[in-house]
Image (spheres, rainbow, N blue to C red):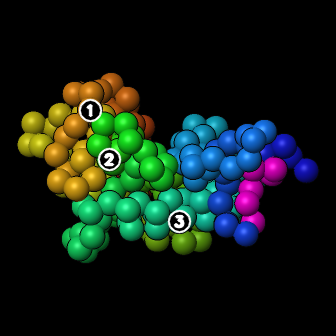
Amino acid sequence: MHALDGFWLADEAYYRSRILPTGRSTKDLDIAVILSAIHAGGTGPHSVHDSRMRSTLARLESLFDAAYAINRDRAPGTGPAMGRYAGDVYYSGGAYYFSTLGAAEFCYRAATGASDAHHWIERGDAFLRTVRAYTPPDGALSEQFDQTSGAQTSARELAWSYAAFISCVAARRLVTGRQG
């Protein structure tokens, strides 16, 4: 058994982001788990190809789909705007570009070698369409976009938002073989 297996909550079908000596955390279901999978790479347990990691992404999608007003009545073919964890209050506690792009990148990496690659690419593209919908014409990416209005908030033109975009697009290009 790998030490990371202890983070799996079978009854809730997700990897928790932390184990505290005092019990559970409101940050248990956290996008950090998805980001760890894409940055660690690999193909085995705890990677984007692990069904438990995929379940964790699905749980996060459900969480933010229900929690954020901007996800209600969203356009067909778009994915939910993603935040960090339930109850986040930093600035608006809104959607983060790096979270939504991280979910897209996870999908593109999951498509690599998968029999259902088309499904994963479409899922990644749905997240990208959401990012596009909340990106102004000049392409500026702040840290967050508000969970109610979609307006950019928090740190303006944040480097990690651009880094997440570059990393996501690079993963898409690898799996699709296309520049677009």
* Sequence-first disc among 2 and 1: 2
Q: Residue at x 73, y 69 (%)?
A: 11
Camera-nearest label, 3 or 2: 2
Read off the residue under disc 1: 154
Q: Residue at x 54, y 64 (%)?
A: 59
Disc 2 marks which amino acid?
Answer: Gly
Tell me if 145 is positioned left or right of 29 in this view: left
Tell whether label 1 touches label 2 (CB within 8 Å). Answer: yes
Tell whether label 1 touches label 3 (CB within 8 Å). Answer: no
Read off the residue under disc 2: 94
Please state the total of marks drawn on the protein image.
3
Read off the residue under disc 3: 58
Q: Residue furthest left?
A: 137
Question: Against 152, is 123 above or below?
Answer: below
Q: Magenta residues, as a range? A: 5-10
Crowd class of label 2 (few under 14; some 14 to 19; many from 20; radius 10 Å): many
Q: Residue 176's x, y, as percent? A: 41, 56
Residue 111 in sight here: no
* Sequence-first disc among 3 and 1: 3
C-alpha span from label 3 to label 1: 26 Å
Q: In terms of secondary structure, where does tag 2 sit?
A: loop
Any magenta on residue 7? yes
Tell whether label 2 touches label 3 (CB within 8 Å). Answer: no
Tell me if 1 is positioned left or right of 159 in this view: right
Q: Residue 130's x, y, as percent? A: 27, 57
Q: In terms of secondary structure, where does tag 1 sit?
A: loop
Q: Residue at x 32, y 60 (%)?
A: 68
Disc 3 marks which amino acid?
Answer: Ala
Crowd class of label 1 (few under 14; some 14 to 19; many from 20; radius 10 Å): some
